[in-house]
Image (cartoon, rainbow, N blue to C red):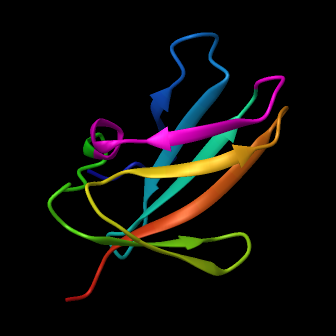
């Protein structure tokens, strides 16, 4: 399912302070942006339900790359990723998630 402009796939249910946006890329991978609009540092998690919103199969492994810093973040399993300790007032992390090669 292509998200031409991206869409919010996870939103903090208490105050709308954190959210995750996603967009499918031309090669079938996905770009995700983790945002913290709250007034204090926060970790933001996209769990299996969050990833399911973009069609990610939790039974597969995925590689994660930090798109701003061009740094590999490793491989995730069970379709869960946490952006740890995002700064307050707009802290963010943009990643690319792609199915890992076997």
Q: Position of residue 70 (x, y in %)?
A: 67, 80
Task: Give whichever of 48, 1 is nearer the camera.
Answer: 48
* The furthest residue to the top: 14
How many numbered markers are drawn?
0
Name the residue located 31 percent from the left edge and 47 percent from the top edge.
Answer: 54
**Left or right placement of residue 73 versus residue 28 in this view:** right
**Rendered position, 2 above or below 43:** below
Q: Residue 66 colored magenta?
A: no
Task: Give whichever of 28, 56 is nearer the camera.
Answer: 56
**Rendered position, 52 above or below 71:** above
Quadrant, the C terminus: bottom left
Q: Position of residue 58 (x, y in %)?
A: 20, 54
* The furthest residue to the left: 59
**Left or right placement of residue 54 versus residue 7 in this view:** left
* The furthest residue to the bottom: 102
The quarter of the picture where residue 47 lies is top left
Name the residue located 18 percent from the left edge and 56 percent from the top edge.
Answer: 57
Task: Give whichever of 72, 7 is nearer the camera.
Answer: 72
Q: Position of residue 99 (x, y in %)?
A: 29, 74
The magenta stretch spans which residues?
38-51
**Left or right placement of residue 34 versus residue 9 in this view:** right
Name the residue located 84 percent from the left edge and 23 percent from the top edge.
Answer: 39
Task: Give whichever of 36, 4 is nearer the camera.
Answer: 36
The quarter of the picture where residue 62 lies is bottom left
Name the residue located 73 percent from the left edge and 75 percent from the top edge.
Answer: 69
**Rendered position, 9 above or below 100:** above
Q: Position of residue 32 (x, y in %)?
A: 52, 54
């Amino acid at each position: 399912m292509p998200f031409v402009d991206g869409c919010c796939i996870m939103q903090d249910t208490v105050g709308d302070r954190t959210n995750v946006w996603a967009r499918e890329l031309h090669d079938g991978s996905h770009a995700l942006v983790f945002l913290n609009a709250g007034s204090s540092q926060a970790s933001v998690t996209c769990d299996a339900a969050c990833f399911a919103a973009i069609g990610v199969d939790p039974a597969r492994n995925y590689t994660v790359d930090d798109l701003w810093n061009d740094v590999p973040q490793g491989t995730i399993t069970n379709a869960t990723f946490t952006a740890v300790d995002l700064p307050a007032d707009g802290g963010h992390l943009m990643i690319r998630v792609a199915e890992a090669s076997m």
